[in-house]
Amino acid sequence: MVTGLTAADFRVYEDDQEQTIDRLIAVSAPFSVAFLADTSASMRFESTDVQDAILSFIERLRAGDRVMAVSFDSRIFGQAGLTGDRARLRRAVFQMGRGQGTRLYDAIELAATKVLGPVPERKAIVVFTDGLDSQSRLATAERTLALVAESHVLVYVVRHDTREAHTPVPPEGLRPTLLPEGYLDNAALYARADQYLADLVEASGGRLYRATTIVDLDEAFEEVARDLREQYTLCYYPANQARDGSYRRIRVEVVRPGLTVRARAGYR
């Protein structure tokens, strides 16, 4: 994070037309965060290690930030509403169990609409998953990507790569209906998961982390917490005032050499 920047250090373009920056705000307002933990059988970390990493992430947030802990497998559990009560959040995290199947798309739609939809600004989804979806009934990959692109929610993904742990033969006693479509073709299955998670963070201006070990997981959560603490908000009135429902592409540049900007790709 580079501190001390001013509006003069930035250029903002909407559909390749430069915009007049009205003001720049260094981060100050609290965040509302929906934390989504994939608790399906495909996830290979020990539950206690994951719980410890989630609790460490929550403790790194600022006092005014609110979090809702959500676990998902074949079911979706909202363990507590958005709250800053750390004791309540610890209880919610310790209640996370382990199940079969994965409703990743449904969980993201729930977080973007029901949990964070009423929140006017400064909101984020943090999702820990391997990217596989086997049982979503309400949402699709395309629908969740559109929701994120149309909202003001940042999405951070901590991806646990489970492809080496997957066997192409269904484990004994596990009904084939619980397995994702294309399960026997691991390469295609994981290629879709990789692309979906990459598109998800690009649409929101968030970031994708990979966690192979529990140390990676803890470091990724630390990076996400830092990102939520340290941001700039650039404000402008669009030169194109038409309210036609079209998608507007945003490009943000910084004039100082040697710096890289990460920002959302656009809005509707």
Image (cartoon, grey):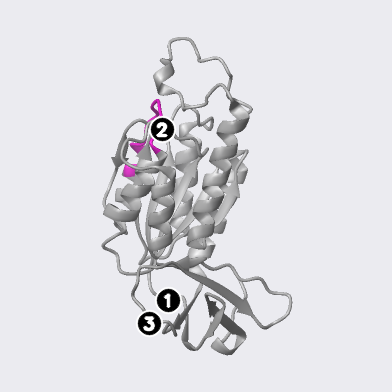
Give the CA separation, mark 2 to mark 3.
41 Å
The image position of residue 3, as x and y in percent, is 59, 79
| Residue 28 tag number | 1
The mark that comes first in sequence, 2 or 3, is 2
The kind of residue tagged 1 is Ser
Magenta-span inclusion, residue 48? no
3 vs 1, front mark: 3
The mark that comes first in sequence, 2 or 1, is 1
Residue at label 2?
102
2 vs 3, front mark: 3
The image position of residue 146, as x and y in percent, is 41, 55
- Residue pushed farthest top? 172
Magenta-span inclusion, residue 96? yes
The kind of residue tagged 3 is Gln
Residue at label 3?
241
The mark that comes first in sequence, 3 or 1, is 1
The kind of residue tagged 2 is Thr
Position of the C terminus by quadrant:
bottom left
* Front-lying residue, 136 or 89: 136
Q: Neighbour class for label 1 at 10 Å: few (<14), some, many (≥20)?
A: few
